[in-house]
Image: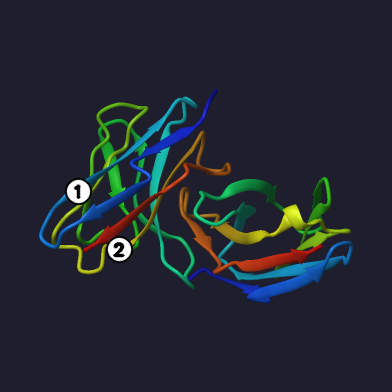
Amino acid sequence: EDQVTQSPEALRLQEGESSSLNCSYTVSGLRGLFWYRQDPGKGPEFLFTLYSAGEEKEKERLKATLTKKESFLHITAPKPEDSATYLCAVQAGGSNYKLTFGKGTLLTVNP
Amino acid sequence: DGGITQSPKYLFRKEGQNVTLSCEQNLNHDAMYWYRQDPGQGLRLIYYSQIVNDFQKGDIAEGYSVSREKKESFPLTVTSAQKNPTAFYLCASSSSWANEQFFGPGTRLTVL
């Protein structure tokens, strides 16, 4: 059974204080790993797709990396507007459709 | 603008009633999905559809039904058989099975 574990559950940072969120996964043949951002009461917003170990992608203050067992979402010099829940999901090679989601990390950035 | 719309944003239901949640997309995506989100849990797949007039059960399909008569539309009916329907419901679509899924704004259903 595919599993995704995100840590920490919640993270509080000061504006400008860089940190990382972790997504550990167990999947039978990774087809893709996805990061989403979700604001309260809204649908998830797509951020990145990573396909193979060693791959990295960046968008503004966010950088996602992937190893064979986990992915990190690095946040550099965060701003209060980066506050949100960040979701990680994996797609297995044989599934063709299914995303397995973690429970998310609630990030709060204080000014 | 291309995107996914869901309606209504909030929905209240009395016990024993069936309700239908709307999902429309103009992204020309073939695949559409319904997820349920509960506090402290990851998103869970209810139903998905790869093409018109075809759909499959996800992990938690009991008490739900769907139809896919048009490529753009994938409505979800929450029946009275669903024991705990209060939740945030999310519709998504994707252009192919290997690509990312894009989500709508969600419908919050509350059973009174």
Residue situated in front as seen by the camera: B73 or B59: B73
- Give the residue at x 70% y 59%: A83
Q: Is residue B73 left or right of residue A64?
A: left
Q: Position of residue B46 (x, y in %)?
A: 33, 55
Q: Position of residue B12 (x, y in %)?
A: 25, 54
Q: Which residue is at a point 40% across and 54% down the rendered structure image?
A: B35
Image quadrant in which the C terminus of chain A is located: bottom right
Pointer 1 indicates a residue of which chain? B
The answer to whether residue A57 shows anywhere in this view is yes
- Which quarter of the picture shows residue B26? top left
Instruction: Say few, some or many: other residues with alpha carbon within 10 Å of mark 1 (under 14 / 14 to 19 / 20 or more).
Output: some
Q: Where is residue B61 drawn, in percent x and y?
A: 27, 58
According to the picture, the residue beneath numbered tag 1 turns out to be B19
Q: Which residue is mark 2?
A: B86
Task: Choose between A15 and A74: the one closer to the eye.
Answer: A15
Element type where label 1 sits in the image: strand
- Whether residue A33 is visible: no
- Please, what is the three-letter code of the amino acid marked with disc 2? Thr
Classify residue B5 by image quadrant.
top left
| Label of residue A7 in the image | none
Q: Residue at x 33, y 41 (%)?
A: B8
Q: Are marks 1 and 2 in contact (CB under 8 Å)?
A: no
**Amino acid at circle 1:** Val
